[in-house]
Amino acid sequence: MNKENGTYNKHLQKYSRIVQDDNDDLVLQFTTEVLGLESLHWGYWDDNDQLNLENLKKAQKNFTSHLSSFIPEGVSQILDVGCGIGDNALHLSENGYKLTCISPDINHQKAFKKLENGKINFHLSGIEKFFSEKQFDLALMSESSNYFDKDIGFEKLASLIKDQGFILSASLFRKKNTEVYSNFHIESEWLESAKKMDLKL
Ligand SMILES: C[S@@+](CC[C@H](N)C(=O)[O-])C[C@H]1O[C@@H](n2cnc3c(N)ncnc32)[C@H](O)[C@@H]1O
C-alpha cells in the first residue's frame, strides 16, 4: 500500500473509524446476553464434539488456553489487538501478563470497564491510529487480523513490539483468492507482508 498516492489515507477513512453506537449492537447483545457467551471467537473444537451451545462455550475456553500456550517464555507486556470483550485478556492477566487492549468499538470499551485494573488497560482505537510510548513483548491478534489491511497492520505492529518481540496470530485465512470469505486475508500474501517488515515465521 503506497502512502504517497492517497490509498493509505482512503484506507484509514474506510477502516479506522470508531464504532460509536453503543445501543444497537444486536449481535453482541444476543451472543452475550441471550446466549451467555463470553467470547467473540469461534473456539477450538474437539473433533468429536457436537455443534451445540454448551460445546461452543467449552471450545471458546479451549481456544483461549490453547492460544496462550504459544506465548514464549519471558513475555510480560502484551498488546491485544482487536481485543473483543476481553476473555483472552482476562485469562492472560490471570496468568501474570500485563495487557494493553485495543478495539475501535465502543461496545467493547463498555465491556472492558468491568475488567480494567492495574494489569488490563483498554484504548478505544483501531491499530491504524494507535500509538504508544510502550514497546511490547508480544502483539496478539486473535481472530482480528482480517479486520485491517495487512501491510498497515504489520507496519504498525513492527513499530510497537520490541526488537526481539513477537506477534501471535490465530485467525481465519483463505488459501487462494475466492469470492466467498473475501474479508479474510490470503495466507501466503499475509505472510509475505510480514516478511517485508523483517518478521520471521
Ligand atoms: C472477531 S473479534 C475478535 C475479538 C477477540 N480478539 C476474540 O478473540 O474474541 C474482532 C475484533 O477486532 C476489532 N477490530 C475491528 N477493526 C479493527 C482495527 N482496525 N484495528 C484493531 N482491531 C479492530 C473488533 O472491534 C473486535 O474487537
Image (cartoon, rainbow, N blue to C red):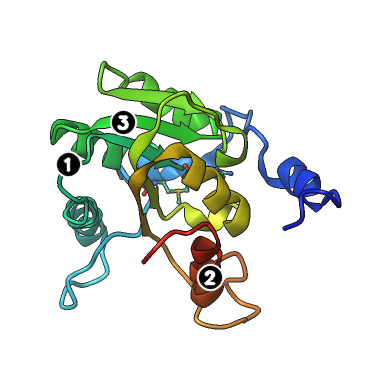
Q: Position of residue 194 (x, y in %)?
A: 50, 62
Q: Is residue 56 above or below residue 98?
A: below
Of all residues, the one furthest to the top in this rendering is 118
Number of numbered discs: 3
Write down the residue under mark 3: 99
Q: Position of residue 79 (x, y in %)?
A: 38, 37
Q: Quadrant of the C terminus?
A: bottom left
Q: Residue at coordinates 58% horizontally, 58% vertically from top-left? A: 150
Write down the residue under mark 1: 74
Beta carbon at label 1 within 8 Å of ligand 1: no
| Residue 113 image-quadrant placement | top left
Mark 1 and 2 residues: CB-CB less than 8 Å, in contact? no
Q: Is residue 177 left or right of residue 158?
A: right
Q: Nearer the viewer, residue 153 or 146?
A: 153
Q: Is residue 46 left or right of residue 128?
A: left
Write down the residue under mark 2: 192
Q: Residues within 10 Å of mark 2 (few under 14, many from 20)?
A: some
Q: How far apart, in angstroms, are the residues tagged by discs 3 and 1?
A: 15 Å
Marked residue nearer the N-terminal end (1 or 2): 1
Q: Position of residue 165 (x, y in %)?
A: 33, 46
> Label 1 sits on what residue type?
Gly
Q: How far apart, in angstroms, are the residues tagged by discs 3 and 2?
A: 28 Å
Label 2 SS: helix
